Image (tube, rainbow, N blue to C red):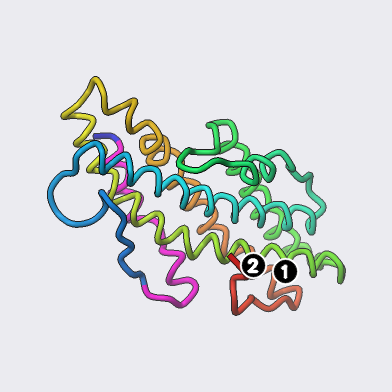
Amino acid sequence: MKYMIFFISFSMVTPSPVYAWGMPELPVEIPGIGGGGGADLSSLESAQSKLADRTNKVMGDFVDALDKFREALGLDRDSSLKEKFANCGSGKVCTESDDIKRIESQAKEVEEKVVQMKKDGVKLSADASKTFLEGLFPYGKGLLKGGFLGADIAAFAPKVTSAVAANPLSAPSQLSVALTIIEQIPPIISTFSGANGGIYDYATYNGIEKPEETGPE
C-alpha cells in the first residue's frame, strides 16, 4: 500500500518533464501496464523486465549528463557510476541504494552550483561551455524519457501492490525488481526534473542554447 500512496502523491506534485520539452504526454503501453483489472505474475514479471531496461536507459542518460555538468563546473566526477550503466545487463536494476543516494546528491550539488555561480556572476570558459552543452543532450533525453517512465511506473505500482497482497509468499521475490524501481526511481526523476530550471537558466546565462534535439539514442 505504501507504494500506491507514494506514487499517487508523486504524480500529483511532480511537474511533467515531457511538457518542459514541448511534447504531449502519450500513453506508453507495455504488458502489465495500463488497462483495467489485475495482471498475473507472469505478465508482471515480463513488464518489470522491460521497465528495468527503460529505467536503466533513463538513469544512464542522467548519469552521462551529470558527468559532463560536473566536469564543466569543476566538480569531482564519478566514473564508477558511468561504468556501472555501461556494463548493465538486461532486465535488472543496475543501481543499489547507495548509488541512488550518490546520484541524487550529485544532482543536487550541480543544481546548487549553477544557481550560485549565476548569482555570483561567474561564467564558464569556452571549453567548459562546450562540455556543459554536451551534458544538455543526455539531460534532455533523460527528462523526456523519464516523463514517460514515471507515468508508467505510477500506473504499474498498484498492480504490483495488488499482486504482493494476493501472493505474499512468492510475489515479493518474483517482483523484486519492480519493487526496487517503484521505491527508488520516482524521487530521482523528480530531482532531475526539478533541477532543469537552474540548469537551463545557467546555460542561457552563458550563451548556451538549449539543444533542439536530444542527441542519438
Query: Which amino acid lies under the numbered mark 1 shown in the image of this protein?
Result: Leu
Contact (Cβ within 8 Å) of mark 2 with mark 1: yes
Which of the pair 157/10 is nearer the observer?
157
Query: Which corner quadrant holds the C terminus?
Result: bottom right
Q: Which residues are magenta?
A: 3-24
Taking the image as shown, residue 61 lies to the left or right of residue 164, namely: right
Query: Which amino acid lies under the numbered mark 2 shown in the image of this protein?
Result: Phe
Q: Residues within 10 Å of mark 1 (few under 14, many from 20)?
A: many
At mark 2, the secondary structure is helix
Which of the pair 161/42 is nearer the observer?
42
From the image, tell me which residue sits under label 1: 133
The secondary structure that most of the magenta stretch takes on is helix
From the image, tell me which residue sits under label 2: 137
Identity of the residue drawn at 57% across and 66% down: 140
At mark 1, the secondary structure is helix
Whether residue 169 is in magenta: the answer is no
Taking the image as shown, residue 100 lies to the left or right of residue 82, namely: left
